Image (cartoon, rainbow, N blue to C red):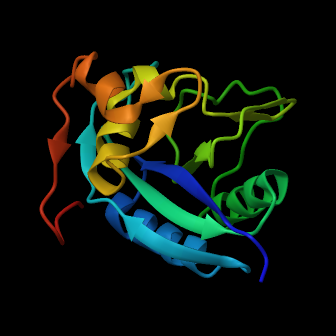
Amino acid sequence: MTPTVSAYIGLGSNLGDSAAVLRAAVDALAALPHSRLRRASRLYRTAAWGRTDQPDFLNAVAWLDTALPARELLAAMLGIEREAGRARRADGSDRWGPRTLDLDLLLYGEAVIAETGLQVPHPHLHERAFALAPLVEIAPQASIPGVGPAHEALARIEMGGIEVLDEGEGG
């Protein structure tokens, strides 16, 4: 049997039916080859971060056990984004703008990866409550390499009005 690693993927959306987009993205992640969905968090409504002149985001985190190498997992995630209608600009000028779907590889086991286009752990994970809160919900034991326990990182930052949505809510 091929060894697997726990990968944590941040999901975000603020265009269209964001709740449905995030549910479909979790289903697509669960269907990846050599991967198994362990858990997905509830949805969290958060104010836009970076560029604030846009709709609120819905965010979540999915936990996969996967045998896919990090680069292949990232490529699959980008494919899921494209299927959801996301078109990334080559120059990155849309980085902080509205989007149908944004998938970020937050953690890949205990790996520290610094390659062009692939940074793990996500370089700002420890600063973003909208990623940490759903991560800690599904994996309270998660640790961020170079930072420490995710729950401790979350306790050190402002929650910024994040709202946990009830099951089934979210449009």
Say left or right for 55 vs 77: left
The vertical placement of 29 against 154, above or below, is below
**Nearer to us in this view, 35 or 117:** 35
Farthest-out residue, left? 166
Say left or right for 56 vs 163: right
x and y percentages locating residue 61 in the rendered image:
42, 53
Name the residue at 55% across, 26% down. Answer: 96
The quarter of the rendered structure image containing the C terminus is: bottom left
Name the residue at 31% across, 25% down. Answer: 152
x and y percentages locating residue 151 in the rendered image:
30, 33
**Nearer to us in this view, 153 or 18:** 153
x and y percentages locating residue 77 in the rendered image:
68, 59
Name the residue at 74% across, 59% down. Answer: 73
How many numbered marks appear? 0
The quarter of the rendered structure image containing the N terminus is: bottom right
The vertical placement of 67 against 157, above or below, is below
Quarter where residue 90 is shown: top right
Name the residue at 46% across, 18% down. Answer: 50
x and y percentages locating residue 129 in the rendered image:
32, 29
- Residue 58 visible? The answer is no
Quarter where residue 32 is shown: bottom right
- Residue 92 visible? The answer is yes
Say left or right for 40 vs 3: left
Farthest-out residue, right? 116
